[in-house]
């Protein structure tokens, strides 16, 4: 892999560039709130930066809750397969007993 | 014109029959020709009921055309064509035939004018599509397909019972507005709800779709849920309950999508989320909302198909689909990456992409009709869609850490199908009037006003900013090999466990009773044997030869006597 050709994002500088572009867009979009005359339908929309704030906070909350959900929802990858083989064994075992009895 | 009599499912069923007996180029040509010719034909069909039969006391209308059914008819043709192109390289008769039958069943269902015809195609959808899951030919896919089939057939049976009640209550089988009145209304609602992946009844989708074949999932994502959306739009527009169900559907799957590792399962959760928007639209029931729901269904078939195709391409070329095993694929799969990003932008409803022009109608309708909280939920869900489908899917598959996999772009037919879908996504986004002209109502809606475009762009860019921030801070949950519990746990773990325990107790008791019975029987036998088991006794095992001779003499004497009878 060492002598492999360098791809675009292998260069940390390019990643930085993309990020700065994103930051720039965000600042610009936020500033447009003050420039463009918006005809709003909901009182919340009157707040400056409502959509940016809602998008940012919404996503952070989404990810943090989802991460917390892992603490009680996460199981090993073969969780359901285990049940299956487990139950099959039990059934055949108890079945065997019955036949022998 | 005689052509008018051909309902669109017929060409597909005939195509399936031909596909079963042909191979290679001939089959490919037939399979490609069917959706094209059928779509051209459908274009010329005017509104109205084209087939009608009397069955017992009821009028059946297996082929009824109006603006609502046409919309779904068109998009099903597009979806079938794209998916067929995508699967041209497949050499598996089972899949090809099942796919054609499945697409035909979907078309049959949306053009059904009565509940009995709807029921027939409803069940055909289940029985044909399950082969696309089983065609993976693994134990996992067999089990998932079985669970899928049981749930789908259950939905069909409930629909049939509901339809019979409906016929008894109203004296007609016509499939029009039903509403939640009476037991029939509720039964049919539940049947539609199961197929529409209502919360708690949604796991058949996230369970089965990721287990289907690469090409099978593309077909699956297009038809089943959209038929259910169509049925709801036909029978339950303006039912307020649907607003709340739909809002729940938009929100809860995104949490699961964020922590899910299998990228096709992420898309399955995202599919439920998108269907949620449609269900909300149907629940609001105004002209704008129904337009929004129907056009979003139209767009979703295409962009969700595109996303499933791009993930299918990844699975096809690398053999892996878990986010934890992938990454860095943009280096060697640049075309797939670009096409996937188009799909991601469309589902996230970026301006100039197809999702934007349809989802915004539902959002506006929610706001117009005073559903403030629902509107906020939809807004949250929109940001969430971008997060898990718009960023997570392309990021973990094509970028993120370099997994070292150097797979090349998929075969040309797969790329072509994706390109076709991507072009449609952009075309509809740039020029929505074409789509709007097909809609059931004329509302004069314009999605491209400055306020709206700005609001949506802000929402999306700051969602992206949140993703970047969380990643830089190391707060973003890593992709892990795992299974996340969902409501399927009830029937996959809890019920089997309860049954297993119950049966193990029953077996223990049963075996104890048998033991006791056998012991007692033994005792009796020994007792009897002691008394009667001597030579020439009643239960004796050894008789002297003399008694044998005597019995032979008795038999011969009997013969002699019988011969005297005239």
Image (tube, rainbow, N blue to C red):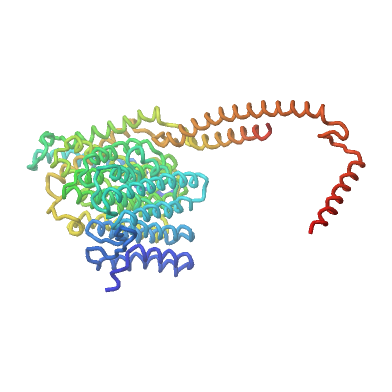
B204 or B328: which is nearer to us? B204
Quarter holding residue B467 = top left
Asked if residue B263 shows in the view, the reply is no
Look at the picture and state if B363 lies above or below B98: above
- x%, y% of residue B271? 32, 45
- x%, y% of residue B114? 30, 56
B427 or B10: which is nearer to us? B10
Asked if residue B84 shows in the view, the reply is yes
Residue lying furthest right: B546
Q: Residue at x 85, y 54 (%)?
A: B560
Q: Residue at x 38, y 30 (%)?
A: A70
- x%, y% of residue B75? 29, 58
- x%, y% of residue B458? 19, 40
Quarter of the image where the N terminus of chain B is located: bottom left
Quarter holding residue B12 = bottom left
A96 or A60: which is nearer to us? A96
Q: Residue at x 15, y 40 (%)?
A: B367
Quick check: A19 left or right of B105? left
């Amino acid at each position: 892999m060492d002598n492999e050709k360098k791809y675009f994002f292998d260069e940390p500088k390019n990643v930085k560039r993309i990020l700065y572009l994103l930051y720039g867009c965000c600042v610009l979009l936020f500033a447009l709130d003050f420039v463009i005359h918006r005809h709003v339908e909901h009182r919340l929309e009157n707040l400056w930066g409502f959509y940016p704030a809602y998008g940012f906070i919404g996503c952070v909350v989404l990810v943090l809750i989802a991460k917390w959900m892992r603490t009680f929802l996460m199981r090993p990858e073969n969780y359901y397969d285990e049940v299956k083989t487990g139950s099959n064994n039990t059934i055949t075992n108890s079945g065997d007993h019955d036949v022998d009895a | 014109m005689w052509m008018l009599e051909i309902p669109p499912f017929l060409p597909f069923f005939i195509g399936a029959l031909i596909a079963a007996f042909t191979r290679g180029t001939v089959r490919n040509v037939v399979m490609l020709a069917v959706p094209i010719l059928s779509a051209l034909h459908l274009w010329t069909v005017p509104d109205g009921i084209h087939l009608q039969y009397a069955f017992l006391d009821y009028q059946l209308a297996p082929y009824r055309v109006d603006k609502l059914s046409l919309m779904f008819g068109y998009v099903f043709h597009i979806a079938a064509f794209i998916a067929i192109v995508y699967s041209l390289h497949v050499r598996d008769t089972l899949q090809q035939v099942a796919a054609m039958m499945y697409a035909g069943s979907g078309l049959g269902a949306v053009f059904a004018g009565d509940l009995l015809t709807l029921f027939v195609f409803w069940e055909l959808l289940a029985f044909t599509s399950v082969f696309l899951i089983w065609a993976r030919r693994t134990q996992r896919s067999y089990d998932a397909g079985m669970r899928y089939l049981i749930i789908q057939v259950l939905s069909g049976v409930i629909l049939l019972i509901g339809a019979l009640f409906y016929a008894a209550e109203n004296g007609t089988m016509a499939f029009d507005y039903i509403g939640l009145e009476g037991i029939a209304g509720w039964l049919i609602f539940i049947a539609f709800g199961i197929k529409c992946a209502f919360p708690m009844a949604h796991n058949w989708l996230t369970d089965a779709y990721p287990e289907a074949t690469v090409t099978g999932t593309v077909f699956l994502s297009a038809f089943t849920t959209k038929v259910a959306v169509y049925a709801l739009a036909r029978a339950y527009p303006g039912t307020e309950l649907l607003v709340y169900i739909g809002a729940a559907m938009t929100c809860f799957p995104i949490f699961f999508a964020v922590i899910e590792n299998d990228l096709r399962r992420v898309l399955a959760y995202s599919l439920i989320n998108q269907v949620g928007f449609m269900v909300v639209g149907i629940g609001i029931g105004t002209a704008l909302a129904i337009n929004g729901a129907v056009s979003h269904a139209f767009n979703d078939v295409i962009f969700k198909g595109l996303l499933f195709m791009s993930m299918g391409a990844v699975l096809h070329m690398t053999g892996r689909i878990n986010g934890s095993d992938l990454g860095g694929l943009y280096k060697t799969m640049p075309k797939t990456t670009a096409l996937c990003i188009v799909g991601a932008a469309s589902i996230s409803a970026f301006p100039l992409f197809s999702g934007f022009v349809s989802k915004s109608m539902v959002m506006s309708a929610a706001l117009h009709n005073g559903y403030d909280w629902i509107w906020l939920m939809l807004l949250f869900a929109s940001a969430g869609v971008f997060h898990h489908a718009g960023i997570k899917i392309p990021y973990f598959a094509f970028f993120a850490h370099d997994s070292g996999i150097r797979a090349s772009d998929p075969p040309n037919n797969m790329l072509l199908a994706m390109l076709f879908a991507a072009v449609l996504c952009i075309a509809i986004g740039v020029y929505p009037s074409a789509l709007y002209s097909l809609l059931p109502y004329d509302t004069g809606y314009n999605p491209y006003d400055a306020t709206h475009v700005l609001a949506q762009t802000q929402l999306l860019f700051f969602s992206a900013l949140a993703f970047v921030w969380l990643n830089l801070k190391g707060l973003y949950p890593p992709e892990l090999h795992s299974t996340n519990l969902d409501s399927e746990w009830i029937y996959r773990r809890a019920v089997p466990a309860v049954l297993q325990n119950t049966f193990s107790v029953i077996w223990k008791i049963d075996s104890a009773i048998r033991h006791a019975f056998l012991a007692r029987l033994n005792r009796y036998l020994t007792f009897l044997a002691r008394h009667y088991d001597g030579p020439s006794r009643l239960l004796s095992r050894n008789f002297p030869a003399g008694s044998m001779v005597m019995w032979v003499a008795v038999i011969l004497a009997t013969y002699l006597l019988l011969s005297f009878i005239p």
